[in-house]
Amino acid sequence: MEKVLILGASGLVGRALIDECRDGFDIYGTYSSTVTSLPEGKQFKLELQQTDKLKEIIRSIKPDIVISCLRGEFEHQLKFHKELAMELRESSSRLYYFSTTNVFDGDYSKPHAETDLPIAESDYGNFKIKCENMLKEMLDERAMMIRIPAIWGKNSPRWNVMKDSIKKNKVIDVYSNLVCNNLLDVQLAKQMTYIIKNNLKGIFHLASVDMMTQGQFYELIISGVTCDTSILRYSLFQDRADIRYFALKSNREDIPGSLQINNKEIISYLLG
């Protein structure tokens, strides 16, 4: 059974990965403050600055697969992932690095596919591009880039905030002209399991197969809870009247349709 080390296992994505992968892999994980559901001997408290401890964990476990869904200060993350790549370079381990739609936030003119060259304006987007490039340079085809949009889940922070806003009748700001896609934590975990088990390579855009404006997505959710959508306050993204895109599309054909999801299915799951 392959050993999988999840860096950031206590986060939304990490928790979903543990639940989905625990029967097919030997799972280990790290956390910063909140412990995971893994057995005590298979989880490790680890901060981004503790690169020596990271190396000790890698050398002790000897993972076949490392999944990084870490969060934290950009420079610390960059240094951490460089040390990680240097350690993995001496092994045959594969690395799956979670990136973001923000690597394209310098161009809102269209949805972006895996073959598009990243272009970012935000600090976050530029940091992710740097990290992607560094990992690909150091690990070549053993580094897989997993770009994802907004992730929702039954206990995700954005869903909890939204439910609280609906309950307390708080205003929710949305863009009427920004087309996006989304994804569920549980669906992402299923897709990742398939990618890992089939040893698929390269860059992956994992997102809902369809797109809608942020305003439309929130309208559908709220109308499933209450008939009053007046808490939504609309504005134009970048103060432009034309349609803008903050969305991923995929040119890959190796993720089966049974593992794909659309926005209405995401909303049905959240409301169910």
Image (cartoon, rainbow, N blue to C red):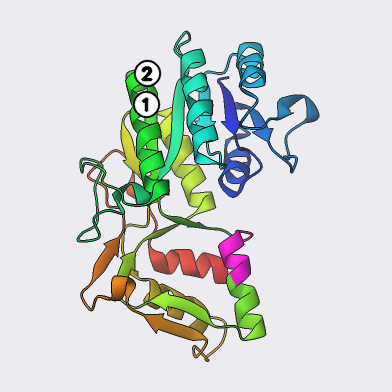
In the picture of the structure, the residue carrying the numbered disc 1 is 134
Secondary structure of residue under mark 2: helix
Rendered image: mark on residue 197: none
Badge 1 density bin: few <14, some 14–19, many ≥20, Cα 10 Å: some
Q: Residues within 10 Å of mark 2 (few under 14, many from 20)?
A: some
Query: For the point 48% across and 50% down, which residue is it?
Result: 187
Q: How many marks?
A: 2
Q: Position of residue 172 (x, y in %)?
A: 52, 79
Front position in the image: 50 or 61? 50
Residue pictured at 32% horizontal, 36% vertical: 203
Taking the spot 52% from the left edge, 91% from the top edge, the residue there is 227
Please say whether residue 160 is one of the residues in the magenta stretch: yes
Residues tagged 2 and 1 counted as in contact (Cβ below 8 A):
yes
- Residue 133, given in percent of the width and then of the height, sits at 33, 30
Residue numbers of the magenta segment? 154-161
Q: Is residue 155 left or right of residue 217?
A: right
Label 2 to label 1: alpha-carbon separation = 6 Å
